[in-house]
Amino acid sequence: MYRLASLLILTTLLLLGCATAAPTEAPLDARALLAQAAINLRVKQTFRVIIERAGADYLFATDLGDVVFSRAEGQFVAPDVIGAKVKIVLGELPIEADVYVKGADQSVRGIWTNMQWQQEVFAPGFDPSKILTEKDGLDTALSALLDPKLIGEETLDDGTVVYHITGTANGLEVAALVVNLIQMTGMVSVDVYLSKDSGLPVRFVIVQPDTAADGDEPTTWTIDLFDFDAGADVEAPG
């Protein structure tokens, strides 16, 4: 009798434990995370951005002629302004330039302008008003990923805990991320890092495999976003 009572009590406790167990969380969906990240960024009034190139040179045409893009650091101010300091190489000469873009209007200041602002085209077709426009810019780039996969959680070098998502995409569509500042062709690999806390995109790494030649590493772009909603401090041409 005692053993039967003990068995009944144990069975009851097991049933109660099963009934109160926390439900299993549904696995995160990479596509849903990317879509939400675009929504989260769209409401931000400002953010800072750093674009760095590694590997094979990337040439683009400017009023100075063909230059090699190295690095850009600046701030986006909604809805249509970017101010940035850009590092380029003209021939063998490293050059820094200040660039101010409002919509389709571009101004540049550098040693060749005697450090005075001049209205001239730095990057043909570049228009920051399209970066956060729904169904354009970032939306186009993120939705272009083919079969995105969630790798898992990682920690960036600044301590930010992120969801790491990887995929491939058509380069022309991914270039919408920087709205014609950079042109990409062929298929590219894309790694996206979304802040676990805020759901904001904080890093993109884009590799262009078809640029590798003569032993060079392929052109690789690292785009970091940070300082969301910080005070605007873009210097406009006076």
Image (cartoon, helix red, strand yellow):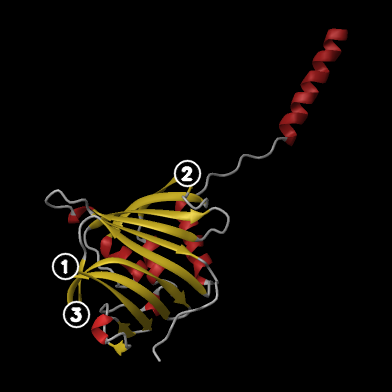
Kindly report which numbered mark, 1 or 3, lies closer to the viewer in this rendering: 1
In the drawing, what numbered circle is on residue 64?
A: 3
Residue type beneath disc 1: Glu
In the rendered image, residue 208, in percent from the top left (x then y), is placed at 24, 56
- Please state, as top left, top right, bottom left or bottom right, where the N terminus lies in the image: top right
Q: Which residue is mark 1?
A: 92
Residue type beneath disc 3: Leu
Seen at 52% across and 66% down, the residue is 227
Residue type beneath disc 2: Gly
Q: Is residue 58 left or right of residue 143?
A: left
In the rendered image, residue 183, in percent from the top left (x then y), is placed at 25, 68
Residue 210 versus residue 89 in the image, above or below: above
Q: Nearer the viewer, residue 115 or 130?
A: 115
In the rendered image, residue 213, in percent from the top left (x then y), is placed at 14, 52
In the rendered image, residue 115, in percent from the top left (x then y), is placed at 31, 85
SS at mark 3 in the image = loop
Q: Nearer the viewer, residue 169 or 65?
A: 65
Query: In the rendered image, is residue 195 in sight?
Result: yes
Residue 133 versus residue 211 in the image, above or below: below
Kindly report which numbered mark, 2 or 1, lies closer to the viewer in this rendering: 1
Q: Are marks 3 and 2 in contact (CB under 8 Å)?
A: no
Seen at 20% across and 61% down, the residue is 57
In the drawing, what numbered circle is on residue 196?
A: none
Q: Is residue 231 left or right of residue 141?
A: right
**Dot 2 alpha-carbon crowd within 10 angstroms: few under 14, some 14 to 19, many 20 or more:** few
